[in-house]
Image (cartoon, grey):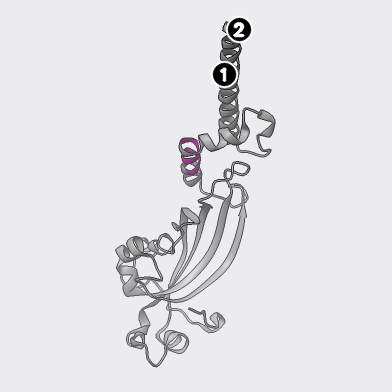
Amino acid sequence: MTTPNESRIEYVDGPIRGAKEGWADSVPRGLGYDADDERLLGSCILQVRQLSAKSAAEHFSCDDNEFMQGVDSLIRVDYETWSTSNEFNPEAPEQVIYRREHVYVMHSDLLAEEDFCNHGMGRDCEINGYALDEEKEGSPEEVQLPANAREGLQLEIESEQREVIAEWLDGDVDKIPAGLGEVMQVLYEEIAEETRQEQDAAEQQAQAKAKQE
């Protein structure tokens, strides 16, 4: 899967024939971010354009590909995604990976939205070109993670990662990472305090048992 000389590609003016941006929104969702190593937090379509028949034929055709028939329906979709590692890191709980990419796909594939959502692109759908335009990793502020995606990430951390955080902190508030957002700061302080209280209670029980013996 390669990307041609994009500086020479021409696009059709006006709206795409019969297209809705909701179809194109299935592209980043189906690109495989919900894999073993990453989980998709959010995505945004930046631009959807249709290539001219001339550009599609010149840059994307090949002799043994039936794609030669009807190449005038080739679509370029520019989008951005935010994802996070499936391996939770208590030292950087809200670390997010941002990517800005674009792909070339057949308009007919975009119409079959269920193919993208259920199977993922590159397996049951044809990608005729791909490019990674930008990639960076950082805090939600640094990568401009949408507010609703950040809220979802925070709720997930609170419900699924409390034990990991508690084990890592071991009741020591001094281990709380610097630069946490307000929600994570409160959560870490709460977990550290809960652990400290549990440790104190266990110590008191041990002392009481020792006295009885």
115 to 127, vertically: above or below: above
Boundaries of the magenta span: 153-159
Point 47% across, 53% down: residue? 39
Question: Is residue 183 visible in this depiction of the protein?
Answer: no
Q: Which mark is residue 14?
A: none
Nearer to us of marks 1 and 2 is 2
Foreground pick, 103 / 95? 95
Instruction: Name the residue nearer the viewer: 21 or 29.
Output: 29
Q: Which residue is mark 2?
A: 211
Is residue 71 placed above or below 170 in the rendered structure? below
In the image, is residue 157 part of the stretch drawn in magenta?
A: yes
Number of numbered labels in the structure image: 2
Expressed as whole percent of the image width and height from the top left, the position of residue 156 reads 46, 41
Q: Earlier in the sequence, mark 1 or mark 2?
A: 1
* Residue 116 position by quadrant: bottom left
Q: Judge whether residue 113 is colored magenta.
A: no
Label 1, on which residue? 202
Helix, strand or loop at mark 1? helix
Please tell me which residue is depicted at 50% across the width and 51% down the height of the picture. Answer: 86
Residue at the image position 50 percent from the left and 82 percent from the top: 9
| Residue at the limit of the structure toward the bottom, as seen here | 63
Q: Quadrant of residue 175?
A: top right
Name the residue furthest top.
212
Secondary element at tag 2: helix
Residue 97 sits above or below residue 8 on the image: above
Residue nearest the observer in this picture, 192 or 20: 192
Residue type at the position of mark 1 = Ala
Q: Residues within 10 Å of mark 1 (few under 14, many from 20)?
A: few
Q: Quadrant of the C terminus?
A: top right
Q: Is residue 48 visible?
A: yes
Where does residue 185 sit, x and y in percent of width and height? 60, 33
